Image (spheres, rainbow, N blue to C red):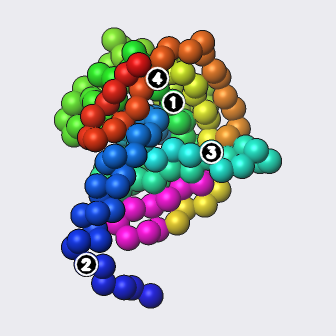
Amino acid sequence: MSVEIGTFVVEQFKAAFRGYPTGVAIITVMGPEGPAGLTASSVASVSLAPPALSFSVMDSPSARLIAGADRLVVNLLGASHADLARDFARPGAPRFTPEQGWTILPTGEPVLDTAQAALRCVPLHRVPVGASTVIVAEVTGATVAPPDGHLIYHERRFITG
């Protein structure tokens, strides 16, 4: 069922979430032409049994690869990753350079060596919602690093602390 939503509600919705600080991640997959990834601020824990998380992606070349992938990595970012988050949020910015610190796992997915946590996942559900896809994924492996401060997305900016 489709309901027409007024412009006022859409603008208020966007304003509400701009003012709601969230953590930042880079979600990565190995595509047919090499690694692909994007910055996401929609990652949330879903379940402990099985360990699962969710995130949403909008339509872009990287998002389409992520939405269709059999395996992916959710790299949770810390304070030292603000520039990297910006790079993966902008089309055409440098990605997967040696200076950024990426490694390819034996299973094929790119992982950020300095991530606060790297969560290897297998998608369980893909739910189309408007122009987005919500992905629920089971975590099949994880590495956690010592704390590096926090990186949040708030009011269209990456903020460290």
Give the residue displayed 21% in from the left and 73% down from the top: 7
Of badges 4 and 3, nearer the viewer stands: 4
Dot 4 alpha-carbon crowd within 10 angstroms: few under 14, some 14 to 19, many 20 or more: some
Question: Do labels 2 and 4 touch, CB within 8 Å?
Answer: no
Between marks 1 and 3, how big is the CA–CA gap?
Answer: 12 Å
- On screen, residue 157 versus residue 108, left or right, reads left
Q: Residue furthest right?
A: 49
Q: Mark 3 points at which residue?
A: 45
Q: Which residue is drawn at 42% across and 26% down?
A: 151
Q: What residue type is labelled 4?
A: His
Tell me which amino acid carries mark 2.
Gly
Tags 1 and 4 touching, CB below 8 Å = no
Mark nearer the N terminus (2 vs 1) = 2
Q: In which quarter of the image is the C terminus?
A: top left
Q: How far apart are marks 2 and 3 (CA)?
A: 31 Å
Q: Nearer the viewer, residue 122 or 15?
A: 15
Residue 38 vs 86, above or below: the answer is below
Between discs 4 and 3, the one toward the N terminus: 3
As measured in the structure, the alpha-carbon distance from the residue carrying label 4 to the one carrying label 3 is 17 Å
Disc nearer the start of the sequence (2/4): 2
- Magenta part, dominant SS: strand
Instruction: Report which residue position mark 2 lands on.
Output: 6
Q: Give the range drawn in magenta.
A: 128-138
Q: Which residue has dot 1 on it?
A: 76
| Helix, strand or loop at mark 3 | strand
The quadrant holding residue 16 is bottom left
Sequence order check: which comes first, mark 1 or mark 4? Answer: 1
21 and 136: which one is in front? 21
Q: How far apart are marks 2 and 4 (CA)?
A: 36 Å
Q: Percent x, y for residue 11?
A: 24, 64
